[in-house]
Image: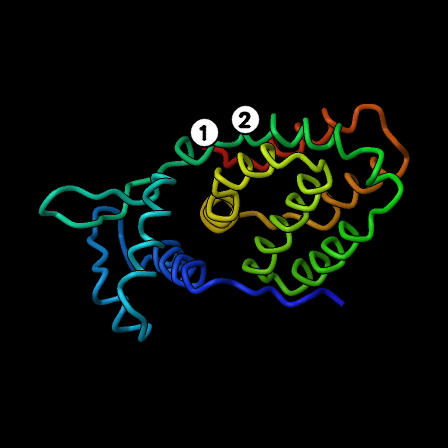
């Protein structure tokens, strides 16, 4: 059984705002009012402000004096910028974690099983959640705190959400793609780092 996902209040608010941007509730250039979100979610403005600050650090929204916070007009090219950086980090992670994951892929197997369900039901939210969890498990298995912190700072979940929901109109078998990576770890493929790098780059949105 996949353990339940527990999000902090800030993360829940961030996901609420992100869903509003993805769904079109807030259009590019439109203002996001901190106080209005706090009232709507029945929370204080502090976690809302923290969530907005995080989204701004990822350049998903922008703020200006006397104008508040507004949604950026993002393009596929904007989203693609983080993928070469992420691919390089995950290549290193795969190489560091190769021995451990060859011996025990249980955590990766759980995420692939969850992705099978998500693919079958066309559940985009679950596809994002388990795709990110799969890659996070690989980075964690590298057992390098600097690598994990750098990877987390990229906002992988945010960019994966936008890539899948906005720029991947054709259905894709996320489970099959990730099962191939698990198989490569199990057979101790010496090219595992390059394979994972190629996989990540293939997930970048296309113009």
Q: CA distance from mark 1 to mark 2?
A: 7 Å
- Dot 1 corresponds to which residue? 81
Disc 1 to disc 2: CB gap under 8 Å: yes
Q: Residue furthest left?
A: 66
Residue at (46% x, 47% y) in the render: 158
Residue at (58% x, 33% y) in the render: 146
The tally of labels here is 2
The colour style of the image is rainbow
**Residue 114 placement, left or right of 17:** right
Residue at (70% x, 63% y) in the render: 117
Counting from the top left corner in percent of width and height, residue 162 is at 46, 47
- Dot 2 corresponds to which residue? 84
Counting from the top left corner in percent of width and height, residue 60 is at 34, 43
Instruction: Tell me if residue 120 comes above or below residue 163 in the rendering.
Output: below
Q: Quadrant of residue 99?
A: top right
Instruction: Tell me if residue 192 comes above or below residue 1 in the rendering.
Output: above
Mark 2: few/some/many CA within 10 Å (<14, 14-19, 20+): some
Q: Quadrant of residue 43?
A: bottom left
Q: Secondary structure at mark 1?
A: loop
Q: Secondary structure at mark 2?
A: helix
Mark 1: few/some/many CA within 10 Å (<14, 14-19, 20+): few
Instruction: Tell me if residue 84 comes above or below residue 14 in the rendering.
Output: above
**Residue 64 placement, left or right of 12:** left
Q: Quadrant of the C terminus?
A: top left
Q: Quadrant of the N terminus?
A: bottom right
Counting from the top left corner in percent of width and height, residue 28 is at 26, 47
Residue at (48% x, 39% y) in the render: 153
**Residue 4 placement, left or right of 56:** right
**Residue 137 placement, left or right of 31:** right
Counting from the top left corner in percent of width and height, residue 80 is at 47, 32
């Amino acid at each position: 059984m996949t353990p339940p996902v527990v999000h902090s209040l800030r993360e829940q608010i961030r996901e609420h705002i992100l869903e509003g941007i993805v769904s079109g509730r807030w259009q590019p250039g439109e203002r996001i009012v901190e106080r209005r979100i706090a009232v709507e979610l029945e929370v204080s403005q502090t976690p809302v402000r923290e969530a907005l600050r995080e989204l701004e650090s990822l350049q998903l929204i922008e703020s200006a004096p006397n104008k508040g916070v507004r949604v950026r007009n993002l393009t596929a090219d904007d989203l693609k910028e983080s993928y070469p950086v992420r691919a390089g980090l995950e290549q290193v992670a795969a190489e560091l974690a190769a021995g451990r994951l060859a011996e025990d892929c249980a955590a990766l197997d759980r995420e692939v099983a969850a992705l099978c369900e998500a693919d079958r039901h066309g559940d985009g939210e679950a596809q994002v959640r388990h795709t990110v969890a799969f890659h996070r498990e690989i980075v964690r298995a590298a057992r390098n705190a600097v690598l994990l912190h750098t990877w987390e700072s990229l906002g992988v979940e945010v960019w994966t959400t936008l890539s899948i929901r906005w720029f991947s109109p054709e259905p894709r078998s996320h489970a099959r793609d990730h099962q191939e990576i698990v198989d490569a770890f199990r057979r101790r493929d010496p090219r595992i780092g390059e394979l994972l790098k190629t996989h990540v780059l293939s997930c970048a949105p296309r113009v």
